[in-house]
Image (cartoon, helix red, strand yellow):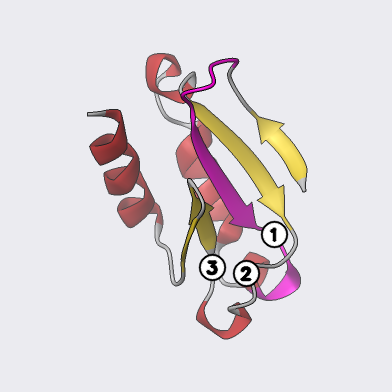
């Protein structure tokens, strides 16, 4: 696991993006970029981590959000989930 960026709050949304070969080739970098481009006030509530494998390689890119694995993530879907969690 690699901490890419994160805030200090215990109440952060923890987003772990698989950066293994399969997920990387399927667009993991686009997911990371989408989170990094959020406004600072939203970004400060997110702990973004890179992880090596979430065990669903054929369905990537894969993300674990607050402990829940979601396969086939898109930047748009990820941003919608983040907005819903931030309220």
Which residue shows up at 30% across the image and 29% down it? 86
SS at badge 1:
loop
Q: State yes or no: residue 20 in magenta.
A: yes
In the rendered image, residue 53, in percent from the top left (x then y), is placed at 70, 67
What's the distance in space between the residues labelled 3 and 1, CA to CA?
Answer: 8 Å
The residue drawn where x is 66% and y is 42% is 49
- Alpha-carbon span between mark 3 and mark 2: 4 Å
Q: Is residue 62 left or right of residue 41?
A: right
Residue at (58% x, 78% y) in the render: 56
From this view, report whether residue 21 is shown above or below residue 80: below
The residue that label 3 is drawn on is 61
Circles 2 and 1, Cβ within 8 Å, touching? The answer is: yes
Earlier residue among tags 3 and 1: 1
Above or below 76: residue 2: above
Label 3 CA crowd tier, 10 Å (few <14, some 14–19, many 20+):
many
Question: In the drawing, what numbered circle is on residue 49?
Answer: none
Q: Quadrant of the C terminus?
A: top left
Q: CA distance from mark 2 to mark 1?
A: 6 Å
Q: Position of residue 38 (x, y in %)?
A: 41, 29
First in sequence: mark 3 vs mark 2: 2
- Queried whether the magenta region covers residue 63, the answer comes back as no
**Disc number at residue 19?**
1
User: Contact (CB < 8 A) between labels 3 and 2?
Assistant: yes
Label 3 sits on a secondary structure element that is: loop
Q: Which residues are magenta?
A: 8-22
Question: Dot 2 surroundings within 10 Å: few (below 14), some, or many (20 or more)?
Answer: many
Q: Which residue is mark 2?
A: 23
Q: Residues within 10 Å of mark 1 (few under 14, many from 20)?
A: many
């Amino acid at each position: 696991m690699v901490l890419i960026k994160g805030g200090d709050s215990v109440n952060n949304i923890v987003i772990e993006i698989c950066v293994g070969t399969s997920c990387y080739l399927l667009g993991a970098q686009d997911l990371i970029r989408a989170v990094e481009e959020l406004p600072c006030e939203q970004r400060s509530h997110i702990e973004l981590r890179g992880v090596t494998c979430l065990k669903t390689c054929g369905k990537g890119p894969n993300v674990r959000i607050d402990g829940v694995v979601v396969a086939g993530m898109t930047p748009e879907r990820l941003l919608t989930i983040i907005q819903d969690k931030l309220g």
